[in-house]
Amino acid sequence: MQIEKHVRVAIAGSGFGGLGMAIRLMQSGIDDILVFERSNDVGGVWRDNTYPGCACDVESHLYSFSFARNPEWTRSFSPSAEIHGYLRACAERFGVLPRIRFDHEIRSATWDDDAQRWRLETKHGVYTADAFVAAVGGLSEPAIPPLPGLESFTGTTFHSARWNHDHDLAGKRVAVIGTGASAIQFVPEIQPKVSALKIFQRTPPWIVPRRDRALTERERRTLRRSNVAQWLLRTRIYALREVMALPFFDARIAKLGQRIAEKHLERSVRDSTLRAKLTPKYTMGCKRILLSDDYYPALAKPNVDVVTDSIVEIRPNGVVTSDGALHEVDTIIFGTGFHVQDYPFAKRVQGRGGRRLADTWKDRMTAHLGTTVSGYPNLFFLQGPNTALGHTSVITMLESQIEHVVNALRYLAKERLATVEPRLEAQNAFVADVDAKTRGTVWTSGGCKSWYLDAHGTNSTLWPGFTFTFKRRVERFDPSEYVLMPRSSRVSNPKRPDESPRTAPVASCASGPEVAHG
Ligand SMILES: Cc1cc2nc3c(=O)[nH]c(=O)nc-3n(C[C@H](O)[C@H](O)[C@H](O)COP(=O)(O)OP(=O)(O)OC[C@H]3O[C@@H](n4cnc5c(N)ncnc54)[C@H](O)[C@@H]3O)c2cc1C
């Protein structure tokens, strides 16, 4: 098949990760890049999640790029559309748009060991790249549970991440399945419109006050005029948020947090039966801690019923629970989260020897520093295994990973090397460290089941620490942790616009297949 184009770096995805990666590469002088986006716009989750009430739950002044601070945020926790607008503006301001191929879903990514490059298949043809950055997001594939009889339902169903704006909820009897981060945002918005709202809750979340508020013109003016004020505000939020990691590591601190959440529930819900249903029986932090001021009050309204019996089947006209009750509804909305543990993109990636990443990750998803995987040269993940967070902005993690990728690619260019992949020992040591840090935390001992842990109870999603420790560990590229290979003699020396022709590989590489640099 004809190759459409060869680039030095291909990036899949144009959310915070893909855009941030493209911007930092270009700023570092690596501009032979292409971004492949399956949709027709940038923005990732902020393009896709348009449900009523959708907003970030980390303050906007931290939930944004550190290199593109935005004094114009209108609220402390900005709505989805505003974050989407911010990402569009960043793509434009930093000149990324011409490098994005929209409607170019990467269908497969295959490492060609002879050519030492990635072969990327899209519906518009095949592209090749020296390095491939998968910034496809950790929460981009909505998950709908396989409920028996779901296909027989005659009403309307949709997932919160694919909100059906054409479906008017006014006067409808609506079932909401799930009580996670999205549901607690859209439930208060739809409750006043619908005739009856049944909330199907498996496990109640711990919820603390959010204290969202509009930012005044005066505040915005101060920030507009002063970079120092912007920096101070961001730093203050950052520090307070890092403190919020403490409950994960110390059950006594978690108990203090629980008291705040219990008070919040008491103040919001007078009915003791409802309060009992909404009180979690696990330690705070074991599942994601949620922020809301209006979720509890919405649940206390007369048209709302919180159902705690488990769902056994869906019938054409409603939802049947384990107590035998049929809850008749016209609409089912799934607030059931995303495919996290099965990372669907792994099925599309084949590394050295044609090994599918989904097979490599069959028992557990692991990556060195959450970013690179042994057996998959020149492949970098943003938001890979063990990079999710329970307490602060994921952008801080993404930026550390992005710097790591830039530093790795710079190193390759400087040393005139062709490929980089982590040593298996280094990767295993990192994973062992993650496991050691996870032991004894609230995630494993808090008495809950969460998407943080896989089927074996192993933490393959969360970074079990502060973000500054991740940054310290990840930003820097330590060559001794990697297998670094020179350009193979089988490669017909592809021309790179920003490099002079290659000469011999570094001296220490010449003799053996694996070279450690330190
Ligand atoms: C509703 C919601 C609220 C959230 N709120 C917060 C918050 O307050 N704080 C926080 O820290 N985190 C939050 N998150 C987590 C969020 O996932 C990250 O903060 C961040 O936006 C992830 O950016 P990303 O670029 O890695 O992934 P995404 O935003 O998911 O972007 C991935 C992109 O890759 C594209 N893509 C996927 N597969 C392919 C393919 N095969 N080929 C080409 N393109 C592809 C997608 O279309 C998408 O544009 C939230 C998530 C959701 C869903």
Image (tube, rainbow, N blue to C red):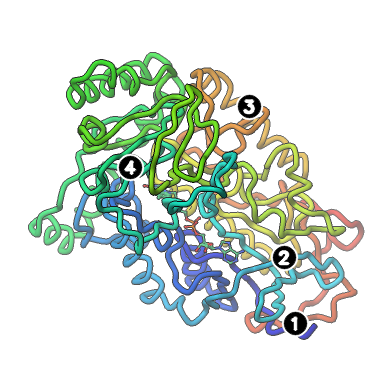
Looking at the image, which is closer to me, 422 or 356?
356
Q: Quadrant of residue 113?
A: bottom right
The mark lying in front, picked from 1 and 4, is 4
Which structural element holds mark 3?
loop
Circle 3 packing at 10 Å, graded few (<14), some (14-19), many (20+), is: few
Tag 4 or tag 1, which sits nearer the N-term?
4
- List the residue tagged with mark 3: 457
The mark lying in front, picked from 4 and 2, is 2
Inter-mark Cα distance, 4 to 2: 36 Å
- List the residue tagged with mark 2: 109
Inter-mark Cα distance, 1 to 3: 50 Å
Tag 4 or tag 3, which sits nearer the N-term?
4
Tag 2 or tag 4, which sits nearer the N-term?
2
The mark lying in front, picked from 3 and 4, is 3
- List the residue tagged with mark 1: 501
Tag 3 or tag 1, which sits nearer the N-term?
3
